[in-house]
Image: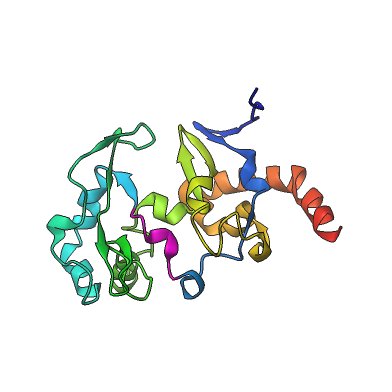
Amino acid sequence: MEEKINYLEYKDLKIDPVIFTQGFVPGCDMRICGGQCCNWGVYMDRDFEKVIMNYETQIKDEMDEFQPRDSSVWFEKELEPDEDFPSGYAIGSELYISSLGVTQCVFKDKRGYCSLQVTAVNNGMHKWEIKPKYCIMYPLTIVDNVLTYDSDHSDRLDYCGRAHEENFTQTVFEAMTEEIKFIMGEDGYKFLYEHFNTNYKKKIQIEILK
C-alpha cells in the first residue's frame, strides 16, 4: 500500500514535501556538469514556441558552428496532450549530434550553455525570458499539478543526481531560491520558506550534525 503524501497547497498548486528534504548540490554549474540535464531536450507549452521564434534571428546569432540554425528542425512536429501546460498541449525541443558526438538539445551549445538564455542576456532581457519553464525549474518539475522533485531525470545525471549524495550540500528547496521565486513569485516563495523554516530546517541541521 502506497504511503499517502500530505501535499502542501498554494493557490491552485500542490507541493510535494520531498522538495524540503531531498538533497542537492550547491546549485547548477555548467562548468562542472556541462549542462548534462539538457541532453534530452525539454517539453514546453505549445504556445511557447512562438515566444522563442520571435527571437529567431538573435538565437541563430548566438548558436555555435555545430548547432542547427535551420529553425524548422528546432521543435518536434507532433504535440503531446498535457494538462500541466496552460494550452493543454506540450511540444518538445529537438535534438542534434554535438561536436563531441553526444545527442543533446538543439539549444545547447558546445560550452554547455543554453542559446536561449545567452540570447536573452545579450539582448537586455531577464535571463529566463525566452527559456522554457521546465529548463528553469530542474531539479523541480510539475506533474499532475504537483510541484515535486524530478527523480526520473535526476537518476540519469552524474553530478547532481540521487546516486551522488556525496555532492549534496543543501536541500532542493534551499538550492532553488531564485527558480522558485521566478515560478511562484515572491509571495509563493515566502509561503514555502516559512513552512520549511518551521517544519524542516532545524531537523535537517540536527541530522547534518550527527
Tell me the chief SS of the magenta region. Answer: loop
Residue drawn 62% across the image and 47% down it: 190
Residue farthest to the front?
101
Q: Residue 101 appears at what percent x and percent y?
A: 30, 70
Q: How many marks?
A: 0
Q: In which quarter of the view is residue 94 placed? A: bottom left
In this rendering, is residue 67 above or below 147?
below
Q: Residue 25 appears at what percent x and percent y?
A: 61, 63
In this rendering, is residue 59 above or below 153?
below
Q: What residue span does the magenta drawing correspond to? A: 34-41
Q: Residue 133 appears at what percent x and percent y?
A: 39, 50
Image quarter (top left, top right, bottom left or bottom right) of the C terminus = bottom right
Task: State yes or no: residue 171 in magenta.
Answer: no
Foreground of the two, 117 or 125: 117
In this rendering, is residue 101 above or below 55?
below
Residue drawn 36% across the image and 55% down it: 40
Q: In which quarter of the view is residue 70 placed? A: bottom left
